[in-house]
Amino acid sequence: MTDTIFLKDLRVRAIVGVWEWERRMPQEISIDLEMAVDISRAAAEDQLEATLDYKAVANRVRAFVGESRFQLIETLAERIAGVIIGEFAVPWVRVAVHKPFAIRNSRDVGVCIERGRR
């Protein structure tokens, strides 16, 4: 399968971090998603029901992340991948979690993981 549906720069305010101030104050994080999906049926039928509803994915990820309280973005990325694979029957996902300005003199820091089989 070579088709991919992606979402870039999905922004969510969340509690994530190991420092005391990070545990008290939500920070804006950014999430990039790539999901393997066979879009041939959707292209032929031109119907939302025939494809992955990326708005539903975005809403679910936003809700999950907003309620989470992980210390590490590594854990957050892993759990996001599990939600997408488990709830949306996606066989492969790439999740990048960005925590902008987490390091002084750096615009961005983050992790990128791939789970499942393409």
Image (cartoon, grey):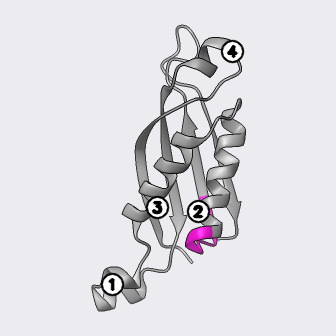
Residue under label 2: 84
Q: Secondary structure at mark 3?
A: helix
Q: Amino acid at mark 1?
A: Ala
Residue with the most extreme top position? 104
Contact flag, marks 4 and 3 (Cβ < 8 Å): no
| Residue that badge 4 annotates | 19
Does the magenta segment cover residue 92?
yes
Picture residue at 59% right of the left edge, 69% below the top: 87
Q: CA distance from mark 1 to mark 3?
A: 19 Å
Image coordinates of residue 18 in percent, x first then y, are 71, 20
Could you classify mark 4 by the number of other residues whose Cα lies within 10 Å: few (under 14), some (14-19), or many (20 or more)? few
Q: How far, Cα to Cα, is label 4 from label 2?
A: 28 Å
**Label 3 Cα crowd, 10 Å radius (few <14 / some 14-19 / many 20+):** some
Closer to the chain start, of discs 4 and 2, is: 4
Specify whether 72 is left or right of 9.
right
User: In this picture, which residue range is highlighted in magenta?
Assistant: 87-93
Quadrant of residue 114 in the image? bottom right
Q: Indicate which disc, 4 or 3, sits on the residue closer to the N terminus.
A: 4
Q: Which residue is mark 1?
A: 43
Sequence-first tag of 1 and 2? 1
- Three-letter amino acid code at disc 2? Ile
Choose mark 4 or mark 2, whichever is in front: 4
The amino acid pointed to by label 4 is Trp
